[in-house]
Image (cartoon, helix red, strand yellow):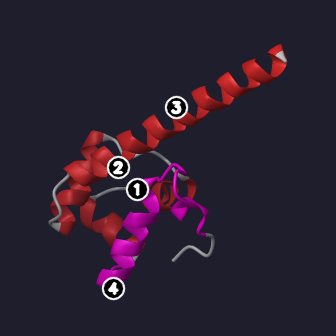
Amino acid sequence: MRDDTIWQLPGHPVHPGPFLGEELEARGITLESFAEQIGRPLGELLAVVQAGALIDEALAHEIGEALDTGHEGWANGTTLYLMTLERDYRRDAAQETISAAD
């Protein structure tokens, strides 16, 4: 489980990778065995869980099928994460523009 909890703060972009790590941990599944189960390189899943690499549609389907959770949550979590990052970027850019105008 991750030691830092900044991703849990309200309004902070939430990447689905930490949730995948927590779900596997709760089920007693190692990331290594899960990577083997779904036929993906361990490094790819490490990048998702630890470094915020995106979960594409194919990986979302593989995760959902393997965990019997459906793919929608994994795919939608990635989309929401990206939308939140974009919202924050636009908000920050607008604030910089306003500050520069003052």
| Disc 1 from disc 2: Cα separation | 6 Å
Q: Residue type at mark 2?
A: Gly
Which residue is denoted by mark 1 in the rendering? 16
Asked whether residue 7 is drawn in magenta, I would say yes
Among the two numbered marks 3 and 2 on one chain, the one whose residue lies closer to the N terminus: 2
Tag 4 or tag 1, which sits nearer the N-term? 1
SS at badge 3: helix
Q: Whole-Å distance between the Cαs marked 4 and 2?
A: 23 Å
- Of discs 4 and 3, which sits in the foreground? 3
Q: Are marks 3 and 2 in contact (CB under 8 Å)?
A: no
Dot 3 corresponds to which residue?
86
Residue under label 4, please give it: 28
Work out how far the residue at label 1 is from the one at label 4, CA to CA, in angstroms.
18 Å
Whichever of callouts 4 and 3 sits on the residue coming sooner in the sequence is 4
Disc assigned to residue 77? 2
Residue range of the region highlighted in magenta in the rendering: 5-29
- Residue placed at 49% from the left, 58% from the top? 43
Q: Is residue 53 above or below residue 70?
A: above
Classify mark 2: helix, strand or loop: helix
